Image (cartoon, grey):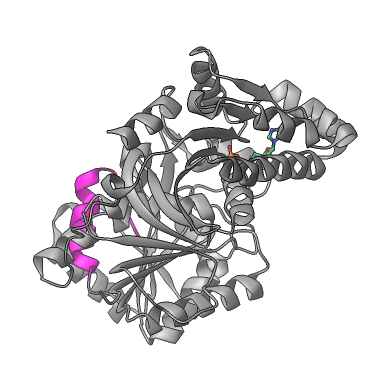
């Protein structure tokens, strides 16, 4: 089926998060890692291109997203989405605004909305201010993010320096009056020359109203949640069809492995819970990897009974991570771990593993790259924003799930295995 909706995500796990939410509609979703080299073929009605441009220089981010847009247009897409983080992660040079402007120019559209709200995950916007749980963004842990520290909570103030034309607000009162009122507010802003409209949303219902008011705009921008209601609207209009083939059931479950390079608080708990089941496990130590390489890890893997679902992890508490980073440098410590988990993934595949559970955003990028995976078909959701995906590597069908740091609950790893066995 030709593509109707084309989304461009500024990072990889953000793209899988979006893919999982869109797939709830039962419409086929396909995710491409990077802009495909080849022309569109076997396209899904909902296509997502995952980029890695959140902190890239502005020119680079604009060029990449333009290339992604061109590919999606060739696939037939008529509606477009620019997906960024629900905490509006951007550097002071900020890519969110410039990319949105470049996409608007290419599409010849005069207005778009900015709605990073994700109420289910505690991200809400009120009077243009973004909250993480009960805290304003700039008072949340995001204020100390190593790459994109967020020191202002007001989206209009964050966005204005990133764009060349006026920024305005459709506030909660406008949204709460319903889709027609919101449309009225948007056209009033348009009359005032406002191109970039931040839209308040504090509850899931707001997202449905906003989607209803905005589904026919050529370009929407925001977090994954604002896109979630769109397929349902287009299904009702007959613009999309549900996906009949059930990929999850056609997939023959083979041996599984857990590869974890995330050190988030939640991943630490998830690894501990999985270890308590008495699984074969190997803990990676960056200092040891720096000294002795990854041969021992690969040898260990080759000796395992794969039917027992081994876990290989570098997941560690903040103190241990800091100690390794101080000795090796943050980047080197990260790269050593990522490269080892990536090598373990290909070795596991060659040994017969067919299901891969991967924890960590960067780690996921490294693993899919080493498996040579450039396209994922989205399957059943394991936790909000974390679906199983189906892909081909070295001529074989495999299932893979890519979990970013804090997603899923404590039982995530066991749950992931169970979902696919069902
Ligand atoms: P998350 O999604 O939780 O941010 P990522 O995989 O994106 O996870 O990032 C975690 C980073 O930390 C990766 O670069 C990984 O290689 C690195 N890392 C993992 N374990 C350790 C460790 N024990 N010491 C230092 N760095 C580590």
Q: In this view, does 305 lie above or below 204?
A: above
Q: Position of residue 159 (x, y in %)?
A: 50, 63
Return the residue nearer the eye: 392 or 266.
392
Question: What span is colored magenta in the figure?
Answer: 198-215
* Most foreground residue, 397 or 337: 397
Residue at 57 percent across and 47 percent down: it is 364
- On screen, residue 86 versus residue 318, left or right, reads left
Residue 31 image position (x, y, % from top left)? 42, 61
Is residue 373 visible in the rendered image? The answer is yes
Q: Is residue 371 magenta?
A: no
Residue 185: % across, % down:
23, 68
Residue at figure coordinates x 24%, y 45% from the top left: 204
Above or below for 29 versus 143: below
Whether residue 128 is visible here, answered yes or no, is no
Where is the N terminus found, in terms of image quarters? bottom left
Foreground residue, 43 or 8?
43
Classify the position of the C terminus by image quarter. top left
- Which quarter of the rendered image does ligand 1 occupy? top right
Residue ID at (66%, 45%): 342
Give the quadrant of residue 285: top right
Q: Please indicate whether residue 314 sits to the left or right of residue 308 in the image.
A: right
Q: Is the magenta stretch mostly helix, strand or loop?
A: helix
* Vertical relation: 240 (above or below) 294: below
Whether 134 is drawn above or below 61: the answer is above
């Amino acid at each position: 089926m030709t593509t109707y909706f084309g989304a461009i995500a500024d990072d990889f796990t953000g793209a899988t998060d979006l893919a999982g939410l869109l797939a709830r509609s039962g419409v086929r979703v396909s995710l491409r890692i990077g802009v495909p080299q080849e022309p569109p073929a076997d396209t899904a009605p909902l296509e997502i291109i995952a980029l890695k441009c959140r902190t890239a220089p502005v020119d680079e981010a604009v060029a990449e997203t333009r290339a992604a847009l061109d590919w999606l247009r060739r696939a037939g897409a008529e509606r477009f989405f620019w997906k960024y983080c629900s905490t509006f992660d951007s550097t002071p040079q900020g890519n969110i605004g410039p990319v949105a402007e470049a996409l608007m120019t290419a599409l010849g559209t005069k207005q778009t909305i900015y709605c990073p709200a994700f109420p289910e995950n505690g991200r809400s916007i009120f009077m243009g201010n973004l909250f993480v749980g009960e805290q304003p963004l700039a008072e949340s842990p995001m204020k100390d993010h190593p790459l994109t520290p967020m020191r202002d909570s007001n989206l209009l103030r964050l966005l204005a320096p990133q764009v060349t034309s006026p920024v305005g607000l459709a506030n909660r009162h406008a949204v709460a009056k319903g889709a027609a009122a919101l449309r009225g507010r948007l056209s009033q802003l348009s009359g005032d020359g406002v191109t970039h409209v931040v839209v308040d949303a504090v509850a899931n219902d707001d997202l449905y109203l906003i989607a209803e008011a905005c589904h026919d705009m050529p370009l929407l921008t925001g977090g994954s949640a604002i896109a979630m209601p769109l397929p349902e609207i287009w299904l009702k209009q007959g613009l999309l069809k549900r996906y009949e083939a059930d990929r999850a059931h056609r997939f023959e479950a083979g041996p599984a492995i857990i590869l974890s390079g995330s050190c988030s608080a939640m991943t630490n708990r998830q690894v501990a819970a999985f270890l308590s089941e008495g699984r074969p496990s190997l803990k990676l130590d960056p200092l040891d990897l720096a000294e002795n390489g990854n041969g021992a890890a690969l040898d260990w893997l080759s000796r395992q009974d794969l039917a027992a679902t081994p876990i290989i992890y570098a997941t560690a508490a903040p103190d241990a991570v800091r100690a390794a980073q101080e000795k090796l440098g943050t980047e080197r410590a990260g790269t050593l771990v990522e490269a080892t988990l990536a090598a373990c993934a290909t070795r596991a595949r060659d040994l017969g593993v067919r299901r891969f559970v991967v924890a960590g955003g960067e780690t996921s990028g490294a693993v899919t790259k080493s498996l040579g995976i450039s396209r994922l078909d989205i399957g059943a959701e394991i936790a909000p924003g974390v679906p199983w995906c189906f892909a081909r590597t070295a001529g074989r069908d495999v299932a893979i799930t890519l979990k970013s740091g804090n997603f899923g609950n404590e039982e995530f790893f066991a749950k992931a295995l169970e979902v696919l066995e069902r």
